[in-house]
Image (cartoon, helix red, strand yellow):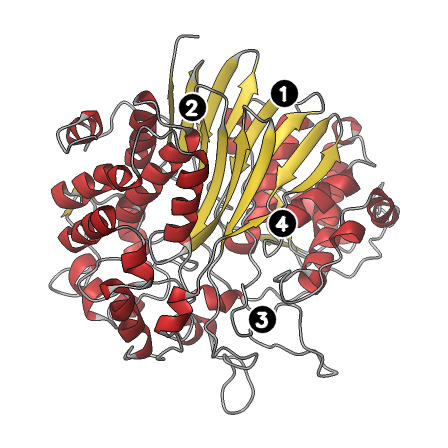
Amino acid sequence: MISRSSKIFFAFTLLLSPASFSFAAVSQKAMVATAEPLATQAAVETLKLGGTAADAAIAAQWVLNVVEPLSSGLGGGGFFVYYEAATRKVYTFDGRETAPAAAFPEMFLDKQGKPYEFWPDRNTGGLPVGVPGTLRLLETVHQRFGSGKIPFGKLFEPAIAVAENGFPVSERLSAYIDGEAPRLHLFPGPRRIFLDAQGQALKPGTILKQPELAKTFQLIAEKGPSVFYEGEMAEEIVRAVRGASFHPGLMTLEDLKAYRVKEREPVKGEYRDYEIWSMGPPSSGGPAVLETLHILNSFPLKDLSAFERVSVFAQAQGLAFKDRNLYLGDPDAVTVPLDKLLSADHAKELAAGIALDGKKVTANFGAVHVPEGTHTTHISIVDEKGNMAAFTTTIEHMFGSALMVPGRGFFLNNELTDFDAQPRDAEGRLAANAAGPGKRPRSSMSPTLVFKKDGRPVMIVGSPGGSKIIGAVLNVIVNVLDYGMTLDEALKSPRVINRDGPVELEAPLSGNAALKKKLAAQGLKTELAKPLGNVQAIVFQEGQLIGGSDPRGNGAAEGYGEF
């Protein structure tokens, strides 16, 4: 047993100002990268106590619920990719939220048959709330891959400490609160916790304490996850969803009780001299990452000109996204032709249509980008035994549905907005990603592991960012594997994304007039992109573990062991 005065708790009382953490780190024994320094510290301390990568990811998740409440937590879901070093096998777990049994394809259409506006009508209140999966997911992972040294309930202790003692609000968190203040103001819980007396966002440096969330964690730690899905808290969740003052929802106690985590087969692909493993459907992320890389196998990127690199990379992403948009959905509800999408023949066929040397692009990259949540968070961990965790976790849009369970301190997701709001095509055919009873919405989360073909680990990588997750992960993979960048360079480099639409360019690429002119001559439209993603990654290099946290966020990488 680990008491509240244990090493975990003691370390956290000392680290409320985590000055020792950095965006990049090097170590030999173990490494952690998360989107917030305190979450990284929770994971590191858990590893030092003999925990596995699975244990450490669980501790990090609950701290992220406290310090990055806009992104993930008890009210959400996620995908967990785990490499067990002893068996040299990759396992993937689907903790995606599910639609209530009363869900139906047209649930987000108004009386005129048009989709509700995404912000704030579709993404706020009880209607978009799916049955949360995170807690059951992490219970499952702990049972399968925990060390046995740290009980599941004890892994809440770092988060309880931070929630009770408080932490200084960062500029980033303050800005996100400000951006979502109109939604947060709709409900008493978030209005009281995250807005000041004047209804304004908490200022940077304000010490934010969350005693209600601490009590919730303590209750689950003592009674177990079933209290969330069948007990007193389940009743409170259902009341919050069905009684929401803004767009009441459809969830029932039966929906919560019926929730199940699913172990899925991972998707696997080959890229150059590497094997890429990721999450399969209902994630579209893993398949789209692999399909893009399979297309790029036909091109020696490092030998191309700077312009051709951008053009080919953008076209390959756009072609994979066309397939993603058309075919990907919940594999328990629709047939997903994965074998075809991930086949070498299909990739070569698509690659043959990519325009080189400035020639006109024949593909029509004209998809309308469906509004969706742009947040989420990712955790990358490797422990002393070589076990690896790539865990992408979310409540969907910033602060999820903006709806909190009264007195419980956590946000409920708005994951059902990941279903196609317009569920039918012009001929009336139902989309693969239409809403339905018990169905899991398509996701873009892309927790990914990279190995050499001889089985040696190379990289753990993942990112938030809605459908931009796929491109963010691809940029880092290609930067490291093709261009030989260090992880730090790969994370800092400007990103290029194509979601079957305009080529989205980060600065300074977006300001390169010559590049944009050449792309336009090919028929490729461009647009300036805000910072794309918040990648958390670990690279294995010559006996060293190199951790990196995206400079677009304010996370931290940290490990331990001499090197």
Q: Is residue 211 above or below residue 110?
A: above
* Residue occupied by mark 2: 31
Query: In the rendered view, does 542 fall on the left or right side of 72?
Result: right
Q: Is residue 432 above or below residue 36?
A: below
Query: Is residue 34 visible from the viewing direction of this image?
Result: no
Q: Disc 2 to disc 4, how far (Cα)? A: 25 Å
Which of disc 4 and disc 2 is earlier in sequence? 2
Q: Is residue 453 above or below residue 169?
A: above
Which of disc 1 and disc 3 is earlier in sequence? 3
Amino acid beneath label 1: Arg
What label sits on residue 456 in the rendered view?
Answer: 1
Q: Tag 4's secondary structure?
A: loop
Q: Residue at x 29, y 77 (%)?
A: 244
Using a 10 Å C-alpha cutoff, classify the residue at mark 2 as few (fewer than 14 neighbours), some (14 to 19) or many (20 or more): many
Measuring from the top left, give residue 46's x and y in whole percent.
31, 28
Amino acid beneath label 2: Met
Amino acid beneath label 4: Gly
